[in-house]
Image (cartoon, rainbow, N blue to C red):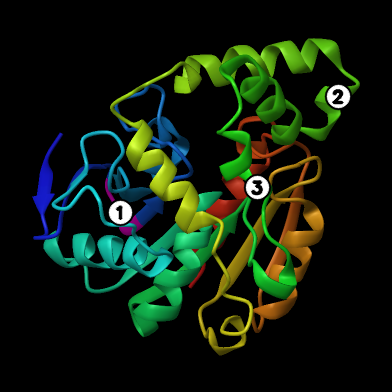
Amino acid sequence: MPTADLGDVTLQYEMVGQGAPLLVVNGTGSDLRRKPSILDSPLAQQFTVLAYDHRGLGRSRPADPTHQPTMADFARDALRLCDRVGWKHLLLLGISFGGMVAQEIALAGGDRIRRLVLASTSPGGAGRASAPLHKVYRLALAERVARLASYTDLRASTNRELRERLIRSILRGGESEDPAAAPGLHKQLEARRHHDTWERLPSLRVPTLVAAGRHDGIAPLANAEALASRIPGARLRVFEGGHVFMLEDRAAWPAMIAFLKET
């Protein structure tokens, strides 16, 4: 995968597909080397998709590994990467932690952002924060994975088959110990717990879709409702599923793609 040296950080990224430029900002602990990734979704059939690993994750490395990035730092990374690949205007999709970063990107990017989808995410502040993953990741591996399964889909607590399937999926996704990623992950979680765009969201003037899973325990539906109510003109769409509803509800990807393609 190519890398972009931005001075204070080197970002690993990948670009696939053809069509309007779409920046996808991934969630906590994401690593494009794990397959399947967001690049294997239906998005690449409709857009030129740019995805990258956050600083400290995958092969993206900060110049100063001791620096604690803020949410604004994560947003600046994304905007500078778009500058590097020559994108002046773009569509934007943020998922989970990436949805928090996408809020900061949209607030900082002005009219660069043509349309915005915020999926499985929260506004923070008075609009409520997502689940405290910085506490969950301090737990021993077995307990951490079990807790993540319950958060990922609230139905897991009463559905043994679903719970076991989620645990297997989380482990395949990299929840086994990865010492190289640990410092970057913990810095990401530290930034995440301070996320708060609530007071600034009314200033957004970007057509926005807030997409939520009905059974999401990480970014509960109440958070999505608050987020949508705070952004002028935003739409809210609720899908049948948990935190990764786009893999559970077949209507999800088509709905998000249709919104991004509206003119």
Residue 52: where, in percent of width, then height?
Answer: 29, 45
Residue beneath disc 3: 132
Q: Is label 1 in a helix, a strand or a loop?
A: loop
Main SS class of the magenta portion in the image: strand
Q: Nearer the viewer, residue 221 or 238?
A: 221
- How far, Cα to Cα, is label 1 from label 2? 41 Å
Q: Residue at x 91, y 21 (%)?
A: 158
Mark 3: amino acid: Pro
Residue 94: where, in percent of width, then height?
Answer: 48, 55
Compared with 216, 144 (above or below) is: above
Q: Residue at x 39, y 48 (%)?
A: 187
Question: Which residue sits furthest right?
Answer: 158
Decide: few, some or many residues near mark 1? Use Cα within 10 Å; few <14, some 14-19, many ≥20: few
Mark 1: amino acid: Gly
Mark 2: amino acid: Ser
Mark 1–mark 2 CB contact (< 8 Å): no
